[in-house]
Image (cartoon, rainbow, N blue to C red):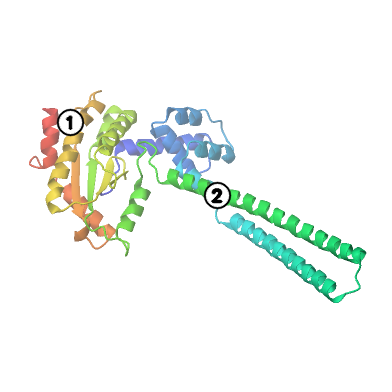
Amino acid sequence: MPTPTRRPGQDRTLQTVAQHMARLEVSGLPRNYELFHEALGGADAALRREVQALAVSTPQQQLDEIGQRYQLPGFVARALPPSREKDIQLLSALRDQMTSGVEQKKGFTRVLESVARSLREDSNAGPADILAEIEFLSVSLSDAVVAETELEAALRVGANQLAKAEREAAAARAVMLRDRLTGLPNHAAFVERLEALYAPDNQAHDTALFLVAIADIGELADAYGEAAANRILKKAASILRKSIKKNDFLARIGKGEFAFLFRDVNRDSIRPISERLATSIADNLVFAASDGAAGVELLVGAALCADAMSPQQLRQQAVAAAETTRGDPRSIVAQQITRSRG
């Protein structure tokens, strides 16, 4: 959707964040702005209380711990290892140990061949000589077994470490792609899915992009407060989540903007789906705004993957389609919202 013009409420929030950080002498790092913006303008009361209780000149380490504890993307991303250097070092050590184990086996093989040759060639060897050769062979075998056991243990530890690192990376990635307010995939996840839609090996040309926007969410926040607006967004997400099937995709991509990717959609299906989405919002979202907001201004736009040559073009087409419903009393959406208010 087009980037909306910054509203007075948004300006006040940014100003409050900057003033609060300046008062506490907090460094102007991007992740610190994210922390204070989420605390002062978000819906997490625990985070807000913790940030408001900070002392002047709080160490950056403490701020980082708060951000990571509340899984804010900027702090989670910073906590990720910058490279796989540790994994490479681990694999290198395992390689060296495997090489040592192979050398031990080769050494035992050479000893075995030497003993066998000695016994074959020395026809005068007595029992004492044979026992000595067997003792030598036993010691060599024992060394090889010890090396093999150490290698097995090292491989097990290394495999566990790599598996743990992979789980931690997957968990961090899941946080990075999740919207904290609604629990839906976020804008980054949507962009990733949209790019995959146009990958060379993807044949999903029957996919359609639907954009649903609560166009007046900024006015609602100004009129009834950020907490009321967040309740509306969470309720909208819950309603829209029920509209998708197993192979569909739903993400929150902006303040009041949601994106769907529906499979198995043709041109004739676009209007019924738009009506279904509009009806769902119109019939149910009014309850989320029962503290005074009688309804919302909703925009819905759709575009077919087959009609666009790139993710950007597909999105532009859907945005343009949504804009045609703005202020049009004859549009599907306007009719549904009017009916819910009547």
Q: Nearer the viewer, residue 277 or 256?
A: 277
Residue 76 in the image, given as x and y percentages of width and height: 49, 44
**Callout 2 environment at 10 Å: few (<14), some (14 to 19), or many (20+)?**
few
**Callout 1 environment at 10 Å: few (<14), some (14 to 19), or many (20+)?**
some
On the image, which quarter does residue 89 sit in? bottom right
Q: Which amino acid does the dot numbered 2 rest on?
A: Ala
Q: Earlier in the sequence, mark 2 or mark 1?
A: 2
Figure check: 319 above or below 57: below
Quarter in which the C terminus is drawn: top left
Q: Is residue 161 visible?
A: yes
The span from disc 2 to disc 1 (Cα, nearest Å) is: 47 Å
Quick check: 172 left or right of 205?
right
The numbered disc on residue 265 is none
Which element is circle 2 on? helix
Residue at horizontal 90%, vertical 66%? 129
The numbered disc on residue 283 is 1
Q: Is residue 17 visible?
A: no
Q: Nearer the viewer, mark 2 or mark 1?
A: 2
Quick check: 10 left or right of 105?
left
Kindly check if marks 2 and 1 are in contact, taking CB atoms under 8 A apart as contact.
Answer: no
Residue at horizontal 80%, vertical 62%? 140
Q: Nearer the viewer, residue 9 or 196?
A: 196
Residue 5 in the image, given as x and y percentages of width and height: 27, 45
Q: Which residue is mark 2?
A: 163
Residue at horizontal 27%, vertical 47%? 248
Q: Which amino acid does the dot numbered 1 rest on?
A: Asp
Residue 334 in the image, given as x and y percentages of width and height: 12, 38
Residue at horizontal 65%, vertical 58%? 94
Residue 325 in the image, given as x and y percentages of width and height: 14, 45
Which element is circle 1 on? helix
Quick check: 37 left or right of 162?
left
